[in-house]
Amino acid sequence: MEYLLNMTAIDLVIGQRKILHQVDLQLSKGEILTIIGPNGAGKTTLVRVALGLIKPTSGQVEMHNDISIGYMPQRLHLDPTFPLSVKRFLSMVGKSQRDRIEPALQEVGAAHVIDSSMQSLSGGEQQRVLLARALMRDPDLLVLDEPVQGVDVHGQSELYQLISRIRDQRNCAVMMISHDLHLVMAATDRVLCINQHICCSGTPDVVTNDPAYLELFGAHAVENLAIYSHDPTHRHNDCDNCCKGESCDR
Ligand SMILES: Nc1ncnc2c1ncn2[C@@H]1O[C@H](COP(=O)(O)OP(=O)(O)O)[C@@H](O)[C@H]1O
Ligand SMILES: [Mg+2]
């Protein structure tokens, strides 16, 4: 099988610290792969190695030739005092791509914020604008680093559905990072669970029953999964500030 991305035996050592150890990762055309793991597990670093932004200490990274990549980084640093409209922000992608701004915003359901300032957007709107920016490159591979962070639980579920829909319509591959344990499972073909090394991998139902997954995320994960599999519409719109829905036991 020909992979879009094939990483083998990746090791990364920075200073004295082993950040990644013997990580293998394969991604096929049109596939959604989600990388999960606790904070500091090396998820962002692994993606940056895949993109060629960090050179691994050892191991191979083979990216298919001539593919276009849309990357949505984990953090966007905007000067809060510098007024910047969404349109202006997206026009920085490149002069030749300005006619893609409106269609991309429409595709992510954010056409109405085109003239708003970036600083005034809600968490969900900001993530949609970042997704639109990644789509403007007409990517064969969409790389999303925690695309639902800062979004309430209801909005998270909508964003994951949107990402699935984008994959279905464009047939692009998606590699995304999440430390969310439940909502993402419905929107992914395969999961790679890492904590420096690969703890487990496979389809969502295989991974969530794997002892390594349960050890890493503990009973908490099981409880959350139970909640969400019993009632997929379970959510508390007002939980965002107290617990982001993760530990809500109301
Ligand atoms: N440039 C760097 N120099 C030193 N340590 C780093 C560097 N980048 C990341 N790390 C460390 O690597 C570990 C993994 O970081 P990261 O990939 O951001 O984790 P995650 O995205 O899973 O939360 C962290 O402990 C972080 O402190
Ligand atoms: Mg990260």
Image: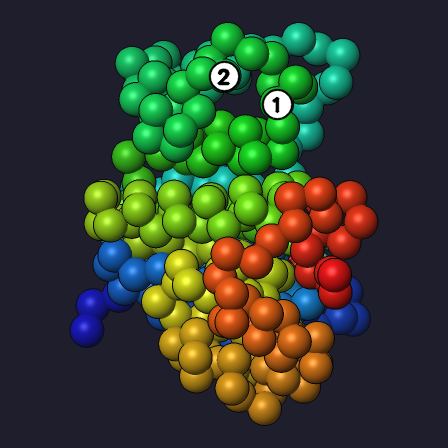
Residue 113 numbered tag:
2
Q: What residue is rendered at 76% in x and 70% in y?
A: 17
Q: What residue is rendered at 28% in x and 35% in y?
A: 138
As measured in the structure, the alpha-carbon distance from the residue carrying label 2 to the one carrying label 1 is: 8 Å
Q: Quadrant of ligand 1?
A: bottom right
Q: Is residue 201 left or right of residue 219?
A: left
Using the image, determine if residue 36 lies above or below residue 217: above
Q: Which residue is mark 1?
A: 121
Counting from the top left corner in percent of width and height, residue 54 is at 56, 54
Q: Residue furthest bottom?
A: 211
Using the image, determine if residue 170 lies above or below residue 91: below
Residue 141 numbered tag:
none
Using the image, determine if residue 143 lies above or below residue 55: above
Asked if labels 1 and 2 touch by Cβ distance under 8 angstroms, the answer is yes
Q: Amino acid at mark 2?
A: Val
Give the structural element (helix, strand or loop) at label 1.
loop
Residue 82 visible in image: yes
Give the structural element (helix, strand or loop) at label 2.
helix
Counting from the top left corner in percent of width and height, residue 239 is at 72, 48
Is residue 130 or residue 154 the one in the foreground? 154
Residue 4 visible in image: no
Q: How many marks?
A: 2
Q: Residue furthest left?
A: 1
Is residue 88 or residue 69 the one in the foreground? 88
Report the quarter where the C terminus lies. Answer: bottom right
Q: Residues within 10 Å of mark 1 (few under 14, many from 20)?
A: some
The quarter of the picture where residue 16 lies is: bottom right
Q: Residues within 10 Å of mark 2 (few under 14, many from 20)?
A: some
Q: Is mark 2 within 8 Å of ligand 2?
A: no
Earlier along the polypeptide chain: callout 2 or callout 1? Answer: 2
Counting from the top left corner in percent of width and height, residue 31 is at 30, 61
